[in-house]
Image (cartoon, coloured by chain):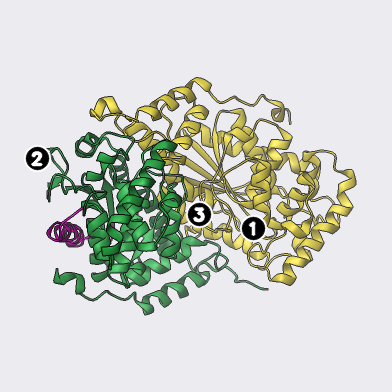
Chain colours: A green, B yellow
Amino acid sequence: MDWLNLPIAQPDAKARRAAEDRQQNLTKPPGALGRLESLAIELAALQGTPLPKADRVHVTVFAADHGVVAEGVSAFPQAVTTEMIRNFARGGAAISVLARTLDATLEVVDLGTVTDPGPLDGVLSKRIAPGTENFAEGPAMSEAELNAALEAGRAAVLRAKQAGAQIFIGGEMGIGNTTAATALLCALQDCDPANVSGPGTGLDAAGVARKAITVRRALARHKPGITSAREALRCLGGFEIAALVGSYIACAQSRFVAIVDGFVAGSAALCAERLCPGVRPWLFFSHTSTEPGHRVILAALNAEPILDLQMRLGEASGAAVSVPILRLACALHNGMATFAEAGVSKKSQ
Amino acid sequence: MDWLNLPIAQPDAKARRAAEDRQQNLTKPPGALGRLESLAIELAALQGTPLPKADRVHVTVFAADHGVVAEGVSAFPQAVTTEMIRNFARGGAAISVLARTLDATLEVVDLGTVTDPGPLDGVLSKRIAPGTENFAEGPAMSEAELNAALEAGRAAVLRAKQAGAQIFIGGEMGIGNTTAATALLCALQDCDPANVSGPGTGLDAAGVARKAITVRRALARHKPGITSAREALRCLGGFEIAALVGSYIACAQSRFVAIVDGFVAGSAALCAERLCPGVRPWLFFSHTSTEPGHRVILAALNAEPILDLQMRLGEASGAAVSVPILRLACALHNGMATFAEAGVSKKSQ
C-alpha cells in the first residue's frame, strides 16, 4: 500500500487569485452571487485554472454487504444490496436517473455482497468477500481486505481521471452501512453512539436504540486496540466505505476534485483526512443529510454543504444533485461580461 | 382592472395523491429524497398531473427606475438600470448566462427607466414613465401607472403560457428597488425599517441607515392613507415590483407555477397574496437572500426556500439557480423504477 504515502497536492494559489479578480469585475455587485462565487473560485484553485469546469462528471457507486446486519440494525433486508445493484444496472435507481439526467458517467463496483449478482452491464465485479464480518463480534475486515477496498477506490479515481472527468463523485450502497459509518465516526471523533445513531433507511425508535447499543458494544470491543484511523476503518468500516476513503485520498493526490455525498460518504471523508491530512481541500460537500451524525462530521471537517434538501438516500444522490449548482457557478464565472466589456458603471458609494 | 377579480385556481388534490402514491413505491426508503419528493408532489398538484415537468422555463425580467434614488439609497448610480438592460440584451448579465445554460427563454420588459435604452433585441419596450416618483415626497405611481404595471406582469405570464412554458420566473432590475421593497414590506407587515433595511447592492452602514430613515419618512407620509395592499403598492412600490405582483396573480389564476426569486420579488409575492388571497400555493420560493427583510417575508408566507446560497443579486438569478433542483425532482419522480418493477424488497421493519 505504498500509494497511500504519495504526496497530497496543493490548491493553486495563482489560479485562485485570478478567479477572485475575475469575480470582482463581473457585472454584478461584488459578492452578490454568494456561494456561486466562492464555489467557482475554489474550483479554479483546485483545477489550477482561472476558468474552472464541471461538465464531465464521473460517478462510481461502491456496493458491499455488512456482517453487522445480523444485529438487526437495518429497516430493509440484506438482499436489497444485491437487488439494488441490479436496479442500478437497469437504470431504475435514483443515481441511475440522476446520472442520466446530468449526462454523467456512472459505474457500479461490487466489492462483495452476500449474494453475487453475477455479470451485469455497468457493474464491475471486484468482490473482496461476501460482505464484511460482524464488527460487533470481531474486526470487519482483515488487513488484506482493507487494502483491496482502499485500492478499489483509488482505481475508480484513476479510471475517471483517465477518461477525462473533471469531477469525481463516489457513492455507496450497502444495507447496514449507516451502522458502520456511525461506529467509524464514534471511533474517530470520540462521540457517544446515542447522540449520532439515526434511522438510516427508516428504523423506528427501538431500531435506532438497538443500533446505538450495537455500536457501543463494538466500540467496547475494538476501541482499546484502535490506535489509528486505519485501524478504526479496518475494525468498524465496510468495503464500500474503505473504497470511498481510498478514492478521496487518490483525488487529493492527483489534483482531482471530489464531491462528497451524505453521512456514509462523510464518514469516509473524515477517515481519509485523518489517514492523510490535506485531503480535505479537495472535497466539496454537497448536502446536509438528516442523519444526526452528519452534522458532527461536517463540523469536524469545517465543511459547509451546498444544499440542504433533507435527503438521506446515499448512492451518491446528494452529490449528484449538487452538480448543477457547480455547473451554474462555472457558467456564470466563465460566461458573464465584465463591467468594462458591458459598459456598465461600477459602484459609486 | 377587472382581471384582478378573476378566480384563483385550486391545486389538484387527485394529482397530488397520485404523486404521493408514486413516491411511496419508488426504489428508495420512503422520504429519503427529502425536498425532492415534496417538490415533485407539489408540482404535480399545481400542474394537475401525476407526472410533473419543469423542462420549459420562461424568464421575464421587468426593469424600471425609482425616484427614491434621489435620497442616496443605492450603492450604484441610476444609469446602471439602463446599462444592465443593454447587458441583458447582449447576453452578459448573470440571468442571461443562467437562462442560456438552462435552455430557458428570457425576455426583458422595460417598464420605464430614466434613460430610454432604445430598441434592443429581446427587450420589450413597455415604458410607463421615466421611472417612478420619489416616494419619500409623494406616491410612487398614479392609479393608471399602477394598473399599467400590473397588466404588464399579467401580459408576460400570458405570453409565457401561450408559448408552452411549464414554469414562469419573474425577475427585476431597478437601481433603488430594495428601498421600495423594504418600504412595501414595512407597510404590509408593520415592520420597523431599521430591522429590515439591508445593504442591497452594497451600501455601507451609513448608507443602510440612510435607507432606513428614508423608508421611515415615506411611511410617516403615506401610512395614514394606506388602507389596502393595492394602495401600499401604488405609494411605495415600483413599476417592476407591481409587474411581479400582477404576474404572480395571473399565474395563480391560470394554473401556472411561478418560482419567486429573492427579496424584491418576495415583497411582490407578499403583496400579491394580500391583494388576492390564494396566490401563495402557486409560488415556489427559490432561495433565501442575505437581505435581512427576506426572512420576514418568507415567514409571513410560510415559505421554505429550496436553496440558501447567500445570493442577493435579483434579476431572477436565484430562481433560475433553483430550476435544476426542480428538474431533477421531476426526473427522479417520473423516471425511477418502482419496487415491483425492479424486483427490490420493501422495508421489513
- Are there few (<14), some (14-19), or many (20+) residues within 10 Å of tag 2? few
Instruction: Tell me what residue is drawn at x 64 percent, y 67 percent.
Output: B202
Quarter location, residue B211: bottom right
Q: Amino acid at mark 2?
A: Pro
Specify the quadrant of the image occupied by residue A99.
top left
**At 29% across and 28% down in the image, what residue appears?**
B339
Tag 1 residue = B291
Q: Is residue B79 left or right of residue A227?
A: right
Can you identify the residue that label 2 sits on? Answer: A119
* Magenta segment boundaries in residue numbering: A139-168
Say which amino acid is labelled 3: Ile
Q: Nearer the viewer, mark 2 or mark 3?
A: 2
What numbered label is drawn on residue B95? 3
Disc 1 residue type (three-letter):
Glu
Inspect the magenta stretch and tell me whether residue A158 lies in it: yes
Q: Main secondary structure of the magenta part?
A: helix
**The one of A209 and B320 positioned closer to us in this rendering:** A209
- Kindly state the secondary structure of the residue where label 1 is placed: loop
Q: Residue A166: x and y, percent?
A: 28, 61
Residue B56 falls within the magenta-colored stretch:
no
